């Protein structure tokens, strides 16, 4: 179950420092990624097989080194940060499931 609107995911400073922040609570797994100074949220499930994109890692390493696309660590699928569109890999043409988030002052919250 997704967290209710207004749930604080992280601080704005934390997202700026790391580029990606994981959120796991009560069976929900999602992540927020910084895209052109805007937070974007996605459910943490690859459309290819439903597995979390970060593989079995606990850290939030969901981007390429260049931080230009989101990457699935299981099968190498790559996704555009602004739309979640898969541009390469076994689920090309499919999308990550969006998770509405926004910046409110010094925090990133669910919408």
Image (cartoon, rainbow, N blue to C red):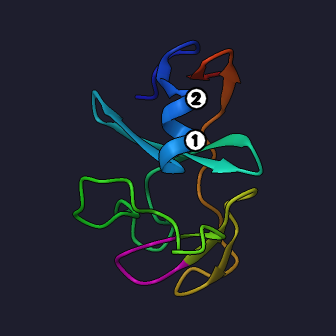
Q: Provide the major secondary structure of the magenta segment.
A: loop
Work out which quarter of the rendered image holds the C terminus and state it.
Answer: top right
Residue 102, picture quadrant: top right
- Disc ID at residue 16: 1
- Disc ID at residue 47: none
Work out which quarter of the rendered image holds the N terminus and state it.
Answer: top left
Reading the image, the residue beneath label 2 is 12
Residue 45: image x %, image y %?
43, 57
Q: Residues within 10 Å of mark 1 (few under 14, many from 20)?
A: some
Q: CA distance from mark 2 to mark 1?
A: 6 Å
Residue 17 belongs to the span the image colors magenta: no
User: What secondary structure is marked by label 2?
Assistant: helix
Residue located 34% across and 77% down the image: 74
Residue 10 or residue 94, whichever sits in front:
10
Residue located 49% across and 18% down the image: 8
> Is 35 left or right of 71, judged from the image as shown?
right
Residue 56, picture quadrant: bottom left
Note whether 82 is above or below 68 in the view shown. above
Residue 60 or residue 6, whichever sits in front:
60
> Is 66 left or right of 76, judged from the image as shown?
right
User: What secondary structure is marked by label 1?
Assistant: helix
Magenta-highlighted residues = 71-77
Residue located 77% across and 51% down the image: 36
- Number of marks: 2
Residue 23 or residue 37, whichever sits in front:
37
Residue located 40% across and 83% down the image: 75
Residue 65: image x %, image y %?
51, 74
Residue 24: image x %, image y %?
32, 36
Residue 40, picture quadrant: top right
Asked if labels 1 and 2 touch by Cβ distance under 8 angstroms, the answer is yes
Note whether 97 is above or below 13 in the view shown. below
Note whether 73 is above or below 25 in the view shown. below
């Amino acid at each position: 179950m997704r967290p209710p609107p207004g749930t604080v995911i992280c601080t704005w400073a934390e997202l700026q420092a790391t580029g990606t922040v994981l959120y796991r609570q009560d069976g929900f797994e999602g992540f927020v990624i910084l895209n052109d100074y805007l937070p974007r949220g996605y459910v943490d499930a690859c459309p290819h097989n439903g597995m979390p994109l970060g593989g079995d890692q606990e850290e939030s390493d969901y981007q390429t080194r260049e931080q230009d696309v989101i990457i699935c660590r299981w099968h190498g699928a790559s996704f555009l940060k602004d739309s979640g569109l898969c541009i390469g890999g076994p689920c090309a043409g499919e999308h990550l499931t969006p998770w509405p988030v926004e910046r409110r002052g010094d925090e990133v919250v669910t919408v």
